[in-house]
Image (spheres, grey):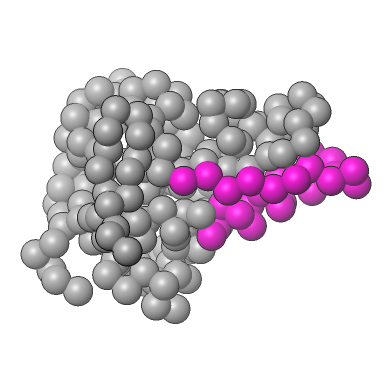
Amino acid sequence: MDPANKAHRLAILLSGRGSNFLAIANSIREGRLPSAEIAVVISNVADAGGLQAAADLGLPHQLIVSKGRPRADHDAEVITCLQSHRVGLVCLAGYMRLLSPEFIAAFPNKIINIHPSLLPAFPGLEAQRQAFDYGVKVAGCTVHFVDEHLDHGPIILQRAIPVLESDDAHSLSQRILVEEHQAYTEAIARIVSGDYEIRGRRFVPCTKL
Ligand code: GRF
């Protein structure tokens, strides 16, 4: 990979178990994201499983605790960490925080998130349960750019699955998670390719066939 191309240096920000992080790490290891590397994994939660997993994989990782601190102070430290690792694309993967305007301005159109619903339906917490309780027949996940609003920026891609008669909220979440792991890699590949435009809210791939 070209070390001058910062867009290929990924940061993963997480707060929990980190299965999406591990799916991305696997994709890189197995050659599905040939021009990307994980520059740093950052957690705002000390006992996040994903942080330990990053350590186990020998990846650069950093705990930047958010609890009890003003958002601006915390985000400023995260931005400094990202810049020091020359990060070009910030991937939120179960990162349980809204980003400050300063954070978003520091990485314009270079912060993406995965959400376990077909946005704009069911933003926020426990999206899979929200969808199941609502009685939807089709559920799924969304990878999108991050703006200052919750689960809101332009959509990069979505994957949909049917809700089965046999499903409960847990089984539906598990099946959505399988889709998430594939969707995140696919979305990163699209971003890393650079072959796209953002027109308003619309993510438009530019590849000429
Ligand atoms: C995923 O469902 C993701 O869509 C949501 O938070 C969850 C994180 O799971 N934003 P994991 O930590 O990646 O396993």
**Residue 106's spot in the image, x, y percent?**
17, 35
The reply to whether residue 192 is in sight is no
Q: Which of 158 and 39 is in front in this view?
A: 158
The reply to whether residue 205 is in sight is yes
Judged left or right of residue 164, residue 206 is left
Residue shown at the point (44%, 60%) measured from the top left: 185
**Residue 174's spot in the image, x, y percent?**
71, 51
Quadrant in the picture for residue 73: top left
- Looking at this view, name the residue that lies furthest to the right: 166
- Looking at this view, name the residue that lies furthest to the bottom: 30
Residue shown at the point (23%, 55%) measured from the top left: 194
For residue 172: magenta?
A: yes
Q: Which of 43 and 165 is in front in this view?
A: 165
In the image, residue 54 sits, relative to residue 46, either above or below, namely below
- Looking at this view, name the residue that lies furthest to the front: 209
In the image, residue 183 sits, relative to residue 143, either above or below, namely below
Q: Nearer the viewer, residue 90 or 189?
A: 189
**Residue 103's spot in the image, x, y percent?**
24, 31
Q: Which of 182 and 64 is in front in this view?
A: 182
Which quadrant, please, contains the N terminus?
bottom left
For residue 101: magenta?
A: no
Which quadrant, please, contains the C terminus?
bottom left
Residue shown at the point (20%, 39%) measured from the top left: 107
**Residue 70's spot in the image, x, y percent?**
31, 21
Q: Which stretch appears magenta? A: 157-182
Residue shown at the point (41%, 72%) measured from the top left: 32
Judged left or right of residue 45, residue 145 is left
Count of residue discs: 0
